Amino acid sequence: MRRRVLITGFEPYGDWSSNPSADVASALHEHQSATLTITSAVLPVVLENLRARIEALLDAHAPDVVICLGLHPGAATLRVERVGLNVADFVRPDNAGEQTRNAELVAGAPHALPASIPVHTIVASQLERGIPATVSNSAGTYLCNAALYQSLHIAATRTAKPLCGFIHLPFSPAQVARLMGGGASDSASGAAPGQDVIASMHITDMCEGVRIAAEIAAAAVCSTSEQMTHA
Ligand code: PCA
């Protein structure tokens, strides 16, 4: 049986005129293998209605696995996030111009929810396949963390609970070329402070890393339901 995997990316935001997470999500749309089928969507970088948008995607696709993606400017590797925090504390406004500070995403809900995809197995497998990756202990306090936390919180309320996780992506090489003076509107402020070489990863490698994550998470769904059957 093929597991259904929902992959979300984010539209461009802040100083950047493109977002590799949208490119990777779109590239993987309708990808099928023996064990899974992927549907993807691109989310606005807007806090208002983010939860409703994720709920609508879960209603429409009933995924077994949800993997949200976003850009982590300056990251040198894929960053598979370990935890979502019940915090919105934006250092920049979202794309609707709202800058939420020091607020809870879900009033009274737990302060942290662990990603339910097997993050360590995913990173080990990505590394084995030659894709630089690491487990990250912070998804930040902006939209990416909000997507992870809301997905986990929504999943917990459903009978069929999808496994949920988040992968932060580096810049694409084309973005770095723009940041380094190749034109467009991107500014050098996209580089992490003190970096004179800005890390990037080719979209093809990012897609492969996310595909590996999807395969491993899909296999984890199988073992969870088998355990339940045998319980
Ligand atoms: N990265 C931002 C939000 C959208 C994105 O791609 C973040 O890390 O929160």
Image: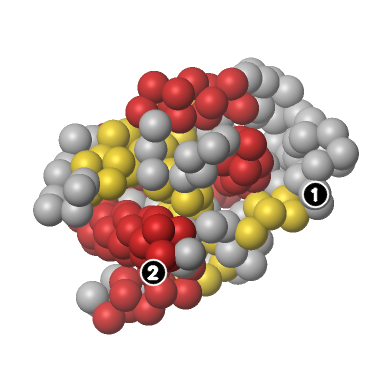
Q: Position of residue 10 (x, y in %)?
A: 46, 35
Q: Residue at x 48, y 40 (%)?
A: 160
Q: As displayed, is residue 225 above or below residue 145?
A: below
Residue 22 placement: quadrant: top left
In this rendering, position of residue 158 left or right of residue 48: left
Residue 107 visible here: yes
Q: Which residue is mark 1?
A: 110
Mark 2: give few (<14), some (14-19) or many (20+) Cα within 10 Å. Answer: many
In this rendering, position of residue 26 left or right of residue 55: left
Q: Residue at x 26, y 40 (%)?
A: 38
Report the front residue among 114 and 8: 114
Residue 122, numbered circle = 2
Residue 119, numbered circle = none
Number of labelled discs? Answer: 2
In this rendering, position of residue 54 left or right of residue 90: left
Residue 173 visible here: no
Residue kind at label 2, given as amino acid type: Ile
Q: CA distance from mark 1 to mark 2?
A: 25 Å
Residue 224 placement: quadrant: bottom left
